[in-house]
Amino acid sequence: DTGVSQDPRHKITKRGQNVTFRCDPISEHNRLYWYRQTLGQGPEFLTYFQNEAQLEKSRLLSDRFSAERPKGSFSTLEIQRTEQGDSAMYLCASSLTGGRQPQHFGDGTRLSIL
Amino acid sequence: AQRVTQPEKLLSVFKGAPVELKCNYSYSGSPELFWYVQYSRQRLQLLLRHISRESIKGFTADLNKGETSFHLKKPFAQEEDSAMYYCALVTQGGSEKLVFGKGTKLTVNP
């Protein structure tokens, strides 16, 4: 198992464009998380899936953001009409369920808005 | 409110010296704390979990509920310990999301 996989590693786009990121969790993990990390900060929670159900969203997740996890496997995070402030590292993590299991992180997708 | 504070943004020590990375937390529920580490050009990875009470790469951390602290310690730092260290608490119930501190960059000089 290669661990959590994220694609692409880097994305450069112009302001106003839409972008989509993909995360493939560890295969037996049914929990999947998205975090955002900006310079000088620790990762901040965005949203969480238990299997295919999106069960919690942070107030950081504006209506321009949408996440899906069809069939409870990979997940996508889409940002519409990107803004300068969306520039950040987007991290995906997965874990087993129950007992506050450790989360395993991917390498992240670095988004740069021109 | 859930909050993790790492007061030192940067910490520099010499090889062989003891090192302590400070972490304080605020959480109304039953706390569970982790230390994550990110080496240069690598992904964030779990270093320690307080309930495991184990030593990883010579690092230990004890949860002090009275002082609401979870400091990371190593008696003799090595150059390969140079990395970014994040303290995090995991919320109880529901998503069990991680709440991270801002991180401490540790540099171990030869």
Image: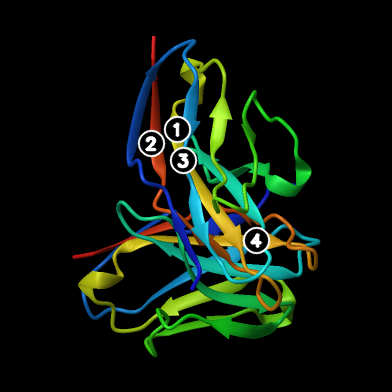
Say whether disc 1 or disc 3 marks the residue closer to the N-terminus: 3
**Does label 1 or label 2 sit earlier along the sequence?**
1
Residue B97 in sight in this render:
yes
Nearest the camera: B8 or B85?
B8
Identify the residue shown where x is 48% and y is 80%: A58
**In the rendered structure, the residue with mark 4 lies on which chain?**
B
Q: Which residue is mark 4?
A: B31
For the residues labelled 1 and 4, the Cα–Cα distance comes to 25 Å
Residue B37 place in picture, x, y as percent: 53, 40
Name the foreground residue: B6 vs A37. B6
Is B94 displayed left or right of A108 in the figure?
A: right
Q: CA distance from mark 3 to mark 4?
A: 16 Å
Are the residues at dot 3 and dot 4 in contact (C-beta closer than 8 Å)? no
Question: Between disc 1 and disc 4, whose residue precedes?
Answer: 4
Residue at (30, 54) in percent of width and height: A39
Q: Is residue A107 visible?
A: no
- Which is more toward the observer, B1 or A107? B1
Q: CA distance from mark 1 to mark 2?
A: 6 Å
Q: Residues within 10 Å of mark 1 (few under 14, many from 20)?
A: some
User: Which residue in the structure is indicated by mark 1?
Assistant: B83
Badge 1 and badge 3 in a common chain: yes
Indicate whether A70 appears above or below B34. below
> Judging from the image, what secondary structure is the residue with disc 2 in?
strand
Residue type at mark 1 is Ala
Q: Which residue is mark 3?
A: B22
Q: Secondary structure at mark 3?
A: loop
> How far is disc 1 from disc 3 in space, using C-alphas?
15 Å
